[in-house]
Amino acid sequence: MGAGIESIDLPHIIQVVIEGWGAFFCIVAIVVIWQTRWADKKKTDGLIRFITVDGILLVVDILAVLFRGQMGPEAFFIVRIANFLVFVAGYMLIIFGVSYFGGLIETRESVSIRNWRLMEYGISLMGVVLILINTVYPFLYDFDDENRYYRLPGSWLISFTYILGVVLILALILNFFGVMTNLERFAVCSALIFPMLSLGFQVFKYGLSLTIIATTVAVILTFVSHMMDYTAVLAAREREREKWVADENIRLLHNQIKPHFIYNALTGIYYGLDEDIDGSKKALKSLTGYLRGSLDVLSARDCVDFEKELATVRSYLEVEAFRFDGQVDFEVDAEDTDFLIPAFCLQTLVENAVRHGIRKKDPPEGKVLVRTRYEGDAHRVEICDNGIGFDVEKAFEKEGIHIGLRNTADRLRLMCGGTMKIESKPGEGTEVYITIPKDMPVSGDISV
């Protein structure tokens, strides 16, 4: 896998050009894949690491070729460091390839391949140790007086460890061949067979880094497979979202502006004018804000600004606090508001906390807390109450129970890739946690 002992000639120029384009492709691929992290963070992170190592491998091999045979202290160190990194990056490529393809298998088959992973990691670690020893006591490869790489009798150990690592990967993949799509099968086989064939060729004829070029071709095919899978996920998600939004909008149009709530709020404000004119005026203003905010987003097909949704919720809580004469208290601690959320999601959860949590206590009083934070590349929203609480597992086993919570979770998932987690204890209260990925495209920005 080194630079070879010949002078820089046309074949090596072609190699440098190919590897340069390969390194550029790796950069572009990483940027593109990063935008797809919302669909499967673990999978995309694994593929990004895989492609990053391949890009590093290409760059250091280019340096090894360009500075081979050059004299001077800079060339002396660059050639040695570059060739060292070429070998180490080759073993790292096996490790991250194992991590990526193994992750696909474990996710789809629900099996553990821990022992196989450890075996592959052990082979790669052994190879790295051999390369480290070679820097002190050359027995794999060395450099002549003209700063050119050449092999030593022990070089077969490098080829052996590479081929053994690839063969073990191939054996595992063939064992789980049925869980992959046709394009994934082709990409996986390419990622394993092409490098192994070129490596076998280089055992007898070396000079050009055919293994590195073959590996890059396989990485490109793996990237294409990932993007095809991502496109299929987007298409399925968009079809499901369109159907859901159409049905959900009809439900929201009938249910969101609740006549009983408006009637009770107006009645409370009317009688409050005799005792608390200023409080009644403030409550009327809050009710107006609630109605305006609800009507503004009632026909929204996509996500809305969280800040607007929060303003509507704050108005709702102010009205409820006035209606129940301070029995309903609330606190809003919003550090992060610059993101999108499906319309009425926050409002539904807060209303649920008041109506089914706090107002069913004895006495019917309590507090609602709405908190937002930006943590770990995601927007996080918490809605907490100290109401009566409920048994989450039993509640969701029954059809029709807490349907608003179930619908809200579905809307978060379909419209912004979000998740919702509920923790509740009877007699203590309920906590709802929403997580919305930062890089998740809103539904209106998606084109398939």
Image (spheres, helix red, strand yellow):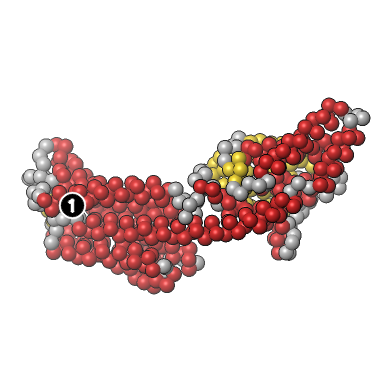
Depth check, front residue: 315 or 189: 315
Q: Position of residue 140 (x, y in %)?
A: 17, 56
Considering only vertical position in the picture, is 118 above or below 307? below
Q: Position of residue 11 (x, y in %)?
A: 13, 53
In the image, what residue occupies the spot 41% across and 56% down?
227
Q: Position of residue 239 (x, y in %)?
A: 55, 59
Crowding at dot 1, Cα within 10 Å, few <14 / some 14-19 / many 20+, comes out as many
Considering only vertical position in the picture, is 327 above or below 199? above
What residue is disc 1 on? 15
In the image, what residue occupies the spot 22% across and 51% down?
18
In the image, what residue occupies the spot 36% across and 50% down?
29
Q: Position of residue 441 (x, y in %)?
A: 51, 47
As drawn, which residue projects farthest toward the top?
278
Q: Is residue 40 visible?
A: no
In-image side of 125 versus 284 (left or right)? left
Q: Is residue 207 visible?
A: yes
Amino acid carrying label 1: it is: Gln
Depth check, front residue: 361 or 302: 302
In-image side of 133 versus 105 (left or right)? left
Quarter occupied by residue 117: bottom left
Find numbered disc 1 in the image and state the secondary structure of the residue it sits on.
helix
Quarter occupied by residue 281: top right
In-image side of 165 versus 235 (left or right)? left
The quadrant the N terminus occupies is: bottom left
In the image, what residue occupies the spot 50% across and 58% down?
235
Count of numbered labels shown in the rendering: 1
